[in-house]
Image (cartoon, rainbow, N blue to C red):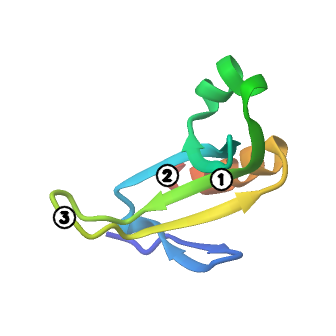
């Protein structure tokens, strides 16, 4: 398998080892911080304070307990979408 290195603010990420990739938002709900889906935020976003947009790179091997995740944080949805497009280019070839 070819190396697919994505250069990010968190360092070089080897996308060939990726098991899951998903966008989300970090919200503050009555003092508690939680990660929610973009879809959830579109439906119920007015009830929470949005703290950041995130792109989660999950490298956890299947059936493993220990989580291996790297999360990139963005201030705007546009920045998140731009990063997702960059990552998607690695999988188009």
Q: Which mark is residue 64?
A: 3
Residue 10 position, x and y percent, is 64, 78
Mark 2 nearby-residue class (10 Å; few <14, some 14–19, many ≥20): few
Frontmost residue, 30 versus 38: 30
| Residue at the disc numbered 1 | 54
Q: Measured from the top left, where is residue 72 in percent x and y?
A: 65, 63
**Quarter-wise, where is residue 6 in the image?**
bottom right
Q: Given contact means CB atoms under 8 Å apart, are the residues at marks 3 and 1 in contact?
A: no
> Residue at 20% of width from left, 57% of height from top?
62
Look at the picture and state if 34 lies above or below 66: above
Do the residues bearing badges 2 and 1 touch, measured as CB atoms within 8 Å?
Answer: no
Q: Position of residue 66 (x, y in %)?
A: 26, 70
User: Disc 2 marks which residue?
Assistant: 91
- Density class for disc 1 (Cα within 10 Å; few <14, some 14-19, many ≥20) is many
Give the x, y percent position of residue 85: 68, 48
Q: Residue at x 56, y 35 (%)?
A: 37
On-image quarter of the N terminus: bottom left
Q: Going from the N terminus, do you reach mark 3 or mark 1 first? A: 1
Dot in front, 2 or 1: 1
Q: Nearer the viewer, residue 19 or 74?
A: 74
Mark closest to the chain's N terminus, 3 or 2: 3
Label 2 or label 1, whichever comes before in sequence order: 1
Instruction: Work out how far the residue at label 3 is from the one at label 1, CA to CA, in angstroms.
Output: 23 Å
Q: Residues within 10 Å of mark 3 (few under 14, many from 20)?
A: few
- Contact flag, marks 3 and 2 (Cβ < 8 Å): no
**Does 65 appear above or below 74?**
below
The residue positioned 68% from the left and 41% from the top of the image is 30
Q: In terms of secondary structure, where does tag 2 sit? A: helix
Badge 3 element: loop
Q: Residue furthest front?
A: 30
| Element type where label 1 sits in the image | strand
The circle on residue 43 is: none
């Amino acid at each position: 398998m070819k190396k697919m290195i994505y250069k990010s603010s968190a360092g070089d990420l080897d996308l060939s080892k990726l098991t899951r990739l998903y966008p989300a938002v970090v919200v503050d709900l009555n003092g508690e911080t939680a990660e929610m889906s973009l879809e959830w935020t579109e439906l119920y976003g007015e009830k929470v304070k949005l703290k950041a947009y995130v792109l989660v790179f999950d490298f956890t091997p299947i059936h493993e307990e220990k989580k291996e995740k790297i999360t990139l944080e963005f201030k705007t949805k546009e920045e998140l979408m731009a990063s997702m497009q960059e990552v998607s280019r690695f999988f188009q070839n």
